[in-house]
Amino acid sequence: MSNLSLFGERLSDLMLESNIKSDELGNKIGVSGSAIRRWQRGDGVINLTNLIALVDYFGCAIDYLVGRSDNTEAFKSKQLPPFALRLREVLQERGMSRYSLNRDTKFKNNYFWKWDRGTIPTLPNIIELADLLDCTIDYLIGRE
């Protein structure tokens, strides 16, 4: 099962456990109920801002919600650094560079250009980067 289908399944499970409907959850995190339902079905790609709002609401790790981990421990979020800055830090820790990602992966200069200007990466890109960098999504974006 793909991470995105696991995401929809886990979102539905968390909503059921919390006894919250899609319209109510949407109101709490600032999106429409139809967006929540699309995410549950796997029809829409969630952006990082909305993903963080969901995991903050449910108190779980991003990696749990997207199916990269089965760890259900409670998680407390903190103020996040800009994504481009945090990515640079993680690359440096791993002894990698933006150039090496540009050369060896699909993440070309246009990705970095957008992220440097504040564009939020999509969930599939975040998952792929976390896999490439062998870290959790929460670590990659600065939540842990």
Image (cartoon, rainbow, N blue to C red):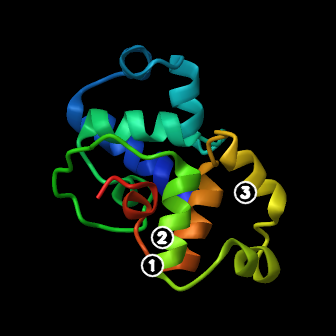
Across and down, in percent, residue 25 comes to: 37, 22
**Residue drawn where x is 76% and y is 56% of the image:** 111
Residue 127 as seen in the image, left or right of residue 60: right
**Residue position marked by numbered label 1 in the rendering:** 93
Q: Residues within 10 Å of mark 3 (few under 14, many from 20)?
A: some
Foreground of the two, 106 or 72? 106
Kind of residue at disc 2: Val
User: Does 27 appear above or below 73?
Assistant: above
Q: CA distance from mark 1 to mark 3?
A: 18 Å
Q: Residues within 10 Å of mark 1 (few under 14, many from 20)?
A: few
**Residue drawn where x is 64% and y is 39% of the image:** 118
Residue 70 as seen in the image, left or right of residue 30: left
Mark 1 and mark 2 residues within 8 Å of each other at the beta carbon = yes
Q: CA distance from mark 2 to mark 3?
A: 14 Å
**Residue position marked by numbered label 2 in the rendering:** 90
For label 2, the SS is: helix
First in sequence: mark 1 vs mark 3: 1
Q: Residues within 10 Å of mark 2 (few under 14, many from 20)?
A: some
Q: Quadrant of the C terminus?
A: bottom left
Across and down, in percent, residue 80 comes to: 39, 44
Q: Quadrant of the N terminus?
A: bottom right
Rendered image: mark on residue 34: none
**Residue position marked by numbered label 3 in the rendering:** 112
Q: CA distance from mark 1 to mark 2?
A: 5 Å
Kind of residue at disc 3: Phe
User: Does 43 appear above or below 91?
Assistant: above
**Residue 24 visible, this orientation:** yes
Across and down, in percent, residue 89 comes to: 48, 67
Mark 1 and mark 3 residues within 8 Å of each other at the beta carbon = no
Across and down, in percent, residue 69 comes to: 35, 68
User: Does 99 appear above or below 60?
Assistant: below
